[in-house]
């Protein structure tokens, strides 16, 4: 295996996939110390600055497309370290990290968490990036309580999750802010400080800036970390509210992910939470079904409807303006206009048995905790919902449908 020698304080940047084994000396990566025989794993979608804390000898295993580069003189890593130390020295309660896609938000959050653990603090980490979730599954906001140092948030496990239902934050701004607030309250109640909040990378338009501003105003962080010079200056006004603002540069050379790579990372997270899931049967009469209009309305007697429409109807409901019907099999609907007149409704929507299959959902318990699952089927005759989930020991009160269906390979299909 090739061996790399580093002098004390020398830095390199490693682009994955790669494995580094410390044979002599010690290294620092995002505030985590690696000693003799420790291994640093660099995922194919990640890159790290590796800092030699003393004269060190490293055994290298480099995968395809991996590379090692010298750290440029303008690399902000040393500034990142010193600012993290400064931030934690004031004992903040809440820290929010803002920045665009691939600007280093998650890495800086890891650095803050590692430094907090090193100081004997009890940090909480909230992952509020619903589209590129690292701690929990996609379409969720997740929180972890780190008790050890890591170099990727995917090494952490969630202690609490809140369901948003989509991988795009644009239509859920108020809901996301409210759910972050819930998790902050839980963390503080559990004695965790600081609470470090990572945000999504949507920031480069007017609506996004307004959204992040609203988030700051509602959450009232002690510290605001802004990564990326393109958004420096937008949040300095929050000094008026007592927040300390730290505007940091992003790494000069970093690993950027394309859309396909981001999709693969989401698939990995779906697989992590669902591949070993077991089937649970939930009585329809014991649970609220939300997020899909067919189960939101008032249930109707299917017998007269079936006779009128000359079709086998499994389920029917109505909302103030729409009639919803689930059919046993695809068939031509007769007398639909007449039916709309009878019920005084302007719209009519038809579903076919199995429409719910492979729908990505959250299962909510009586304490408001959300857990991921996938609908297997609905047995309308026996009024049972079959759901696959890892969390089979919970007593669920709500099933929340998302905008996502999952294939058997855990790739997502977005539903309009």
Image (spheres, rainbow, N blue to C red):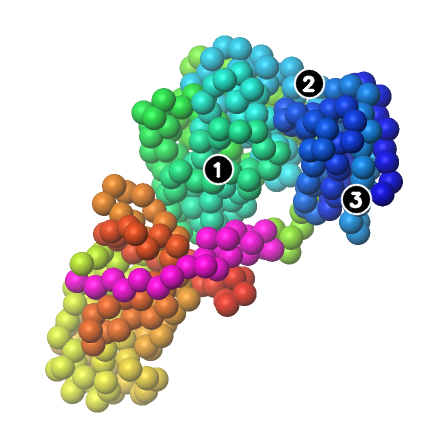
The nearer-to-camera label among 1 and 3 is 3
- Does residue 160 appear left or right of residue 234 in this picture? left
Tell me if mark 3 has few (under 14), some (14-19) or many (20+) residues whose alpha carbon lies within 10 angstroms of its own: some
**Relative to 170, is 260 on the left or the right?**
right
For marks 1 and 3 on the same chain, the one whose residue lies earlier in the sequence: 3
Per the image, label 1 sits on a secondary structure element best described as strand
Residue drawn at (68%, 40%) of the image: 41
- Say whether marks 1 and 3 touch (CB < 8 Å): no
Q: CA distance from mark 1 to mark 3?
A: 31 Å
Tell which of 350 and 193 is nearer to you: 193
SS state under label 2: helix
User: Sequence-wise, which precedes: disc 2 or disc 1?
Assistant: 2
- Measure how far apart labels 2 and 1 are at the Cα level: 24 Å
Q: Earlier in the sequence, mark 3 or mark 2?
A: 3
CB contact under 8 Å: marks 2 and 1: no
Which quarter shows the C terminus? bottom left
The residue at which mark 3 appears reads as 61
Range of the magenta residues? 263-285
- Check disc 3 and report its element: helix, strand or loop: strand
For image coordinates 68% across by 18% down, the residue present is 79
Look at 12% across and 82% down and name the residue there. Answer: 304
Residue 32 percent location from the top left of the image = 63, 26
Instruction: Give residue 214's quadrant in the image.
Output: top left
Would residue 218 be visible to someone looking at this image? no
Q: Is residue 397 above or below residue 225?
A: below
| In magenta stretch: residue 269 | yes
Which residue is nearer to you in this view: 386 or 212?
A: 386
């Amino acid at each position: 295996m090739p061996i790399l020698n580093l002098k004390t304080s020398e830095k390199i940047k490693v682009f994955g996939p790669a494995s580094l084994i410390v044979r002599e000396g010690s290294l620092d990566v995002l505030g985590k110390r690696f000693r003799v025989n420790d291994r640093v794993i660099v995922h194919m979608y990640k890159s790290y600055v590796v800092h030699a804390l003393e004269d060190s000898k490293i055994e290298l295993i480099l995968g395809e497309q991996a590379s090692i580069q010298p750290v440029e003189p303008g690399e902000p890593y040393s500034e990142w370290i010193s600012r993290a130390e400064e931030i934690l020295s004031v004992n903040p309660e809440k820290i929010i990290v803002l920045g665009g896609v691939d600007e280093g938000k998650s890495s800086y959050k890891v650095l803050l968490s590692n430094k907090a653990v090193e100081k004997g603090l009890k940090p909480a980490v909230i992952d509020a990036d619903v589209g590129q979730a690292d701690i929990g599954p996609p379409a969720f906001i997740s929180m972890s309580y780190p008790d050890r140092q890591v170099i990727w948030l995917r090494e952490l496990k969630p202690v609490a999750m809140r369901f948003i239902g989509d991988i795009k934050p644009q239509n859920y701004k108020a809901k996301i802010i409210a759910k972050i607030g819930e998790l902050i309250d839980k963390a503080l109640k559990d004695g965790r400080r600081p609470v470090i909040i990572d945000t999504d990378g949507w920031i480069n338009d007017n609506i996004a800036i307004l959204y992040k501003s609203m988030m700051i105003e509602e959450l009232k962080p002690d510290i605001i970390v802004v990564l990326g010079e393109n958004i420096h200056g937008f949040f300095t006004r929050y000094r008026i509210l007592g927040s300390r603002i730290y505007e940091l540069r992003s790494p000069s050379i970093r690993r950027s992910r394309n859309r396909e790579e981001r999709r693969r990372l989401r698939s990995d997270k779906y697989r992590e939470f669902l591949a070993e899931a077991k089937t649970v049967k939930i009585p329809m009469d014991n649970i609220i079904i939300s997020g899909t209009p067919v189960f939101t309305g008032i249930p109707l007697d299917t017998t007269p409807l079936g006779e009128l429409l000359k079709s086998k109807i499994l389920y029917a409901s109505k909302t103030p303006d729409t009639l919803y019907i689930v059919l046993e099999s695809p068939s031509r609907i007769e007398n639909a206009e007449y039916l709309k007149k009878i019920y005084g409704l302007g719209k009519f929507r038809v579903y076919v048995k199995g429409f719910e299959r492979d729908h990505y959902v959250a299962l909510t318990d009586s304490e408001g905790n959300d857990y991921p699952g996938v609908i297997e089927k609905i047995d309308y005759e026996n009024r049972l919902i079959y759901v696959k989930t890892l969390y089979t020991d919970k007593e669920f009160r709500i099933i929340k449908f998302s905008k996502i269906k999952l294939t058997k390979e855990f790739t997502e299909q977005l539903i309009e």
